[in-house]
Image (cartoon, rainbow, N blue to C red):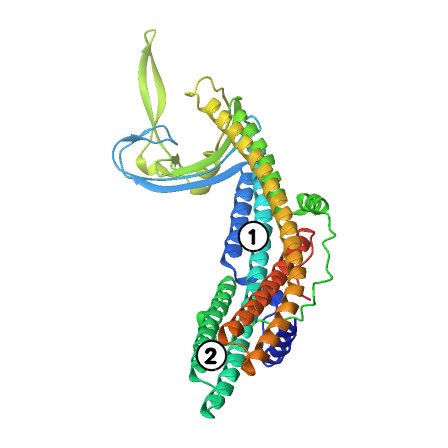
Amino acid sequence: MSRLILFIAFCVPIFSRAQAWTLDSCVQYAYLKNISIQQSELNVKLSEATELNAFGSLLPNLNGQATHGYNWGQRIDPFTNQFATERIRSNNFGLSTNVTLFNGFSLLNSWKQSELNTEANKWNYEKMRNDVALNVSSSYLSVLLNREFLYIAQQNVEATRRQTNRLEKLVFAGQLAEGGLADLQAQLANDKASMVSAENNYELAKITLMQLLQLDASQMETFEVFVPDLKDISGEQIITNPEIIIQAALSNFPEVKSATTSLASADLGVKIAKGAQYPSINASYSYGSGFSGASKELTGEPEVVYTTYIVAGTEVSVPGFNFDSDDYTLKPFERQFKDNVNQALFLSLNIPIFNGFSARTNVKRAEINREISELQLEQTKQNLEQSIYRANADAKAALATYNASLESVAASEKAFAFAESRFENGLTNMVDYADARTRLDNAVATQTRSKYEFIFSLKVLEFYQGKTISLK
């Protein structure tokens, strides 16, 4: 216990001099920078675009067209219905629209399905944020734990170094044989190796946290986490009923809502597939006009020519008109555009009779997908329940281990103090001294680890109750 107090006293001054990351700042930064969250956010935007497209499928389309061209050689002009042989300029303009009046409600259900898919992706986005928050919290506590182990290793090195210096003086004064000093020097070397290992584990824990935050490796030297004043947990109790937490989580957690929404989407998928078995009705309308260089009108005065016919023995002169090419001029574009207007309205009915079993197969696939979604919902609920039960069991086990370690640490501290005193007075050997300190180190390590395991499990349980993860 005294080592834990020393650790807090040792760390707080250090972090007060540095710009340390709190757990909350780590979580909030990860929300902004984590790649998995960004990908999930893009999936939401994609589904929103698909939803808009599905809604647009319910509306009539509208398309315009225009052409401008020239024709050589003999052809029938579509506007004059006469043969034309010279080069003719022509223009066509038109608008057309088409709408599906009925197709077994497939379009309507597709739009509703796309809305549900968007909602499911939004819940997936929230789930990803939750997962990142839990991962960051776990990694953050791992940094704190390994930093505490590093401090313990450093204290061991200092304690062994003090003993070594004391024995060196005694050996130099001829009051002690060199054999005991050699054993202690070997112990110091082992303690230094343990400190290097602890330091490496601490750095690795920081790297893991930095990777979750998408921080650059160049920031390693300045990256530090804030060490909160974690209270003693010996008086803590697990009084929360996991069943209550499970009921709250099943009602509010995004993974359950996402799976529920996906199941509703699969239900609509069955309706969409069945809609393909119904007749479909479509309506189309077009409006167009055009211009032709072959369309001309009479503007000059034609020559009157009389032709004589014998009718019943009597000569009859019949007047006629002789038109010259100069008597015709090109019909103006505006008048042609007005005169050449054409409109068309069509209704079409399509009745599916046989399509190679594709419609029936699609229905079967949709029904299977619905069953898969139903199983995924049940699996999600089971996984959530297991996570809560596991966190509750881990918290109980960690608290029990911590409480049991209190007596172990206290007894080990007394035993080590006694062994250290006997060793300093030459009443015991190095082996007994090292064994006593090893037992103390193991007891402190067990206590420290169980403390952080309890804190994390407790925070997970609070998280499943809808509370924000915090070490305040």
At 50% from the left and 66% from the top, the residue drawn is 205
- CA–CA distance in space, label 2 to label 1: 52 Å
**Frontmost residue, 454 versus 268:** 454
Residue at mark 1: 128
Residue 399 position within the rendered picture, expressed as x and y whole percent measured from the top left = 66, 58
Residue 465 position within the rendered picture, expressed as x and y whole percent measured from the top left = 70, 51
Residue at mark 2: 184
Quarter location, residue 397: bottom right
Task: Say which amino acid is labelled 2.
Answer: Leu
- Is 419 left or right of 181, judged from the image as shown? right
Tally of numbered discs: 2
- What is the quadrant of the N terminus in the image? bottom right
- Determine the secondary structure under disc 1: helix
Task: Say which amino acid is labelled 1.
Answer: Met
**Frontmost residue, 343 versus 19:** 19
**Frontmost residue, 296 versus 209:** 209
Question: How many C-alpha atoms fall within 10 Å of the one at disc 2: few (<14), some, or many (≥20)?
Answer: many
